[in-house]
Amino acid sequence: MKVFLTGGSGYLGRSTIQALIRNGIEVTALARSEQSARTVADLGAVPVAGALTDTDVLRDAAERADAVIHLGVDYSEGTADVDRAAAEAMQDGAGSSPYVHTGGVWVYGDTGGVVDEDAPLAPPQITAWRLQNEKRVLARAATGEHPVVVMPGLVYGRSGGLAQSFFVEPGRAAGAVPCIGDGSAHWALVHVDDIAELYVRALNAPAGSRYAGASGQNLPLADITAALSQAAGCPGRIRPLTLDEALREMGPIAEAFALDQQFSGARARRELGWNPAQS
């Protein structure tokens, strides 16, 4: 089996390439620079030169593969439009072959306890654009195509991810890790190696499926920031922030970090046999 992957040189992409190869799958990976090409090649994938805006490249690479996993995001102006056009091109190329699209659990907003994929949607502004794109992706199941959406929780591990960038590194510099609010809000966590394995299993998921990639580690932010302070080298030193203060320091993503979210992840366990090892 051969899978074409976008975002392969990124944090989640590197672990996903490794998971695919461990499962005996050949990987071709989009690479927008020589450095990205070296990264994916060193992991064992074959680089495909291009960017998410190169829809002809995406369509052709998807057509040549047996399945597609879309992890990449273009964070320049027009993110939603770039993502939509890229998804359409890859789905056109993939046809009836599996196409796995990346979403995120933040689109559910505050969950009010432990929920699953059927919970109401209430995205913060930073992720609201995903809803229409995912709706378009999944709608193709009705015409004989094979879309699947994986929605990772807050991905951590291997000294990377958003928690590293927005909490550990600033905490190391300031001598105290930021904590938004009183620390009672929960994060739905998933280890980067576990979510990578879910992407592999999603290749065999039924068309039109959605999976919350959360391992059941729904920890309060107070506990998470305490652990992050250890990683930052300032054990127990926490700097409380109001949401307004966090928005000024972190930007719009602070609204997502402040969400109170808990997910079961049971659907992926039940339907795909996903067994997150880090939970």
Image: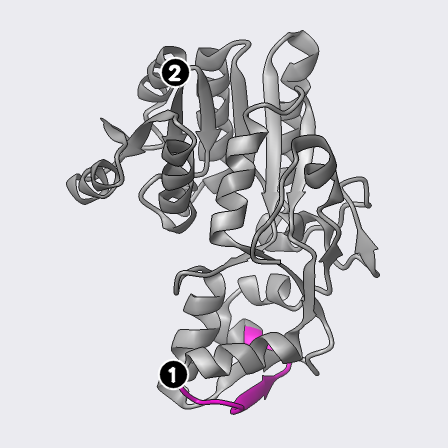
Q: Residue 53 at x, y = what percent?
A: 35, 30
Up-down relation of residue 164 to residue 140 (above or below): below
- The residue indicated by pointer 2 is 65
For the question of whether residue 233 can be seen, the reply is yes
The residue depicted at 18 percent of the width and 44 percent of the height is: 35
Residue to which mark 1 is pinned: 172
What residue is drawn where x is 68% and y is 33%? 210
- Residue range corresponding to the magenta coloring: 233-246
Image vertical order of residue 247 relative to residue 31, above or below: below
In the foreground, 204 or 117: 204
Where the N terminus falls, by quadrant? top left
Dividing the picture into quadrants, the one containing residue 145 is top right
Amino acid at circle 1: Arg
* Quadrant assignment for the C terminus: bottom right
Nearest the eye: 60 or 236: 236
Residue 132 is marked as none
How many marks the image carries: the answer is 2
In the displayed structure, 231 sits above or below 274; it is below
Which residue lies at the image location 60% right of the left edge and 37% below the top edge?
150
- The kind of secondary structure element at disc 1 is helix
Q: Amino acid at mark 2?
A: Ala
Between 43 and 221, the residue placed more toward the observer is: 43
